[in-house]
Image: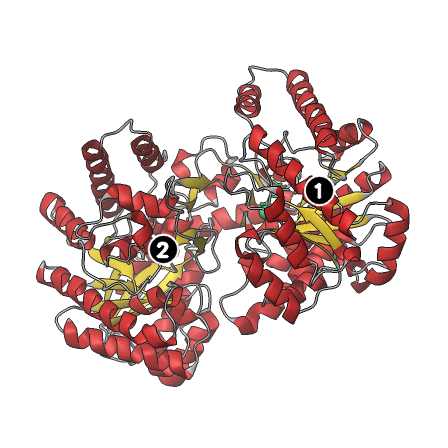
Amino acid sequence: MKAVSTAIGYPYIGENREWKRYVEAFWKKDLSEADFALKMKELRLKQVKHQQSLGMDLVTTGDFTLYDRMLDVSTMFGMVPDRYGWQGGRVDVSTYYAMARGTADAVASEMTKWFNTNYHYIVPEYDGKTLQLTENYLLTHFEEAKNELGIITKPTLIGPYTFVQLTKGYDKTSKAAFVLQLISLYAAVIQQLADAGAEWIQLEEPAFAQSLDAEDVKLIQEIYKQLAQEAPEARLMLQTYFQALSAYGELSKLPVAGIGLDFVHGAEENMESLRTDGFPQDKVLGIGIVNGRDVWRADLAEKAEAIKAVLSLSDAQEVWIQSSCSLQHVPVTTQSETQLEPVLKNALAFADEKIVELTQLCAYAREGQWSGNKSVSESMEAIEALKQHEVRKNERVKKLVSEVKEEHFSRPMPFKERQSVQKQALQLPDFPTTTIGSFPQSAEVKRTRKAWRQSKMTNEEYAEFVRKETARWIRIQEEIGLDVFVHGEFERTDMVEYFGEKLTGFAFTEKAWVVSYGSRCVKPPIIYGDVEWTAPMTLKEVAEAQALTSKYVKGMLTGPVTILNWSFVRDDLSREQVANQIALALKEEVQALEQAGIAIIQVDEPALREGLPLRKEQWNDYLAWGVNAFKLATSGVKNETQIHTHMCYCEFNDFIEPIRALDADVISIETSRSHGELIDSLKQHPYELGIGLGVYDIHSPRVPDIEEIDTILNDSLAVISTEQFWVNPDCGLKTRGEEETVASLKNMVEAAKKLRRQK
Ligand code: GLN
Ligand code: ZN
């Protein structure tokens, strides 16, 4: 049996985020273009060499990018919108970054989430221009590894079907022309790679794991038939991930040399497909067995059993033992962590450790047995030790979770009745104005927090600083004339870390960064134990703010599903169980706020949508427990207490039912970039609970004028009644400057007042 160890991709940021440093230095002009290109090349080669030194048989290239791999494909094919003034030929890096980040004259391309991950890609725009091959960067990367390291790599690129699915700008009539041009260019790139000596070329097709109808299947078949005709020499490895391959019966017969399947997410369905349809004996089977989405050490014995089962069902002659998806979704190496407690650290595996696991599993697959290596028992012991850790044995939490009943998922009074109770109790004007929570995190706020973190400041001094900044913004809100205030979130860095540090069961790393988009990296916390509330987390800041004003100050919390989705989560419990633990902890906080007299409490769930499974038919399962977790956290309050929530990037059309199911008294949603669309969808799907449509885009420093907000408000009146109507910006203001924030909010308040006079 031939077995090859490989990964679908590797994190490009480097152990110390060198990649980010170079990219940002180049943006700031601290690095010349030539030096930047050199640094990038050095990093690429270092990473290829490093993976090989870990024992990996087949290293991937083309997984490295200067910003985003979808953008790499767009620019490779000359899909550069006219607004960037590109004249044809090679797409230079400044045009490349203009598309990614925008310039003074041209807005950036849209960015959106990569399937069900927290990574965001740049959405390709097709504008009808003839496509052209501008530069085959994959060839460059392949040849540099071959010539300078003597390593024959496997170039990878996003597959044509997935690329088509994620591109915007074509319609039914122009689609065929777009697809045809695209296939020829893909074929040219692939053929050049094969001519240069690439033995394998990997095409990533995560869209094959989404729901596919007959028309989609037909399009895929045509694309791959055409590719095979135009690049007959190339050996293509078709990689699917994040879910089982849809339409396996048909798609496993595509004219490619290998098919990679995810045996972590979608394992059962893929196994069932192998059982019913068998595996084509002329192809190599990629067995995605090591989880590319989590940070946990694999149970090698269990994984070996799984491989055995796949082998016996598929009868494949050659297999690749690989990660379930690209390792870009996990941090680089646990070796960079010096502060984690040993039991936890020993149970973790980041990209490098996962590669070692792949080589061990590959040896097993090759030999059909474990030959005298201790890795199996070591992995078992590490996992067992974590299981026995006292952080996983919190009896109070287990009891609380076991006592959760259906009635804890709903408020005692239906919305309509609550609405009038709250109207009476709160006495807010029509069209109440508010903000989403955070105010500008100025350089001073960031500097002070850093000093405190580095112990250059006492806890008291830091608290005093936060108190002053909060008080200053209470005054500013009074001056602006807002109706419902916030404390400003100056004590928080991000929405999850702040809470994780105060709850039990969370661990924080030093260097476990993953890219969220472009050069922005996040360091998700690791939920490894039972989550328990031990003391109020937000009460002090909110109550102090409330004491300074007679206006309402909203309590401000991050919701259970968002905390879950933005963390790496223990895998010995279901996600539902962990979500309920977090929800119960938040419920305590909600109650503490309410008892202290906070009348309005906002629980943000910006990440509810991104956790949606790839297949629509699986949405309901996820939403059922996700929505319940939110309700578990928020339903224990008095009828008078008003629960708000907030969501970003919310496509209302297919999400209105879940939003309604949250039963939040008020939701604020980020929409200002496509207001017309939102109003249309509200026409089609009437919504009756409180709602604040974001009336201006906070992602830009531009100050919206009164007339412009006024128009949006008036248009919204067609679909939203006065009783439910709130007025707010579309997201938190922490990235904005003070001056523009104040000016924008003043205009917003003026527009709301105008609307009141009009009524
Ligand atoms: N309350 C948070 C803030 O204003 C919400 C952030 C978000 O929507 N992502 O910053
Ligand atoms: Zn938001």
Mark nearest the camera among 1 and 2 is 1
Q: Are marks 1 and 2 in contact (CB under 8 Å)?
A: no
Q: Which residue is mark 1?
A: 434
Name the side, left or right, on which 703 lies relative to 261: right
Q: Which residue is mark 2?
A: 326
Q: Amino acid at mark 2?
A: Ser
Question: Looking at the rendering, which quadrant does residue 18 occupy?
Answer: top left
Q: How many marks?
A: 2
Assign a secondary structure to mark 1. Answer: loop
Question: Where does residue 328 sit, x and y in percent of width and height?
Answer: 37, 50
Depicted 116 relative to depicted 587: above or below:
below
Note whether ligand 1 is within 8 Å of mark 1.
no
Name the side, left or right, on which 485 lies relative to 188: right
Question: Where does residue 151 sit, x and y in percent of width and height?
Answer: 15, 50
Residue 639 can be seen, yes or no: no
Name the side, left or right, on which 198 lies relative to 628: left
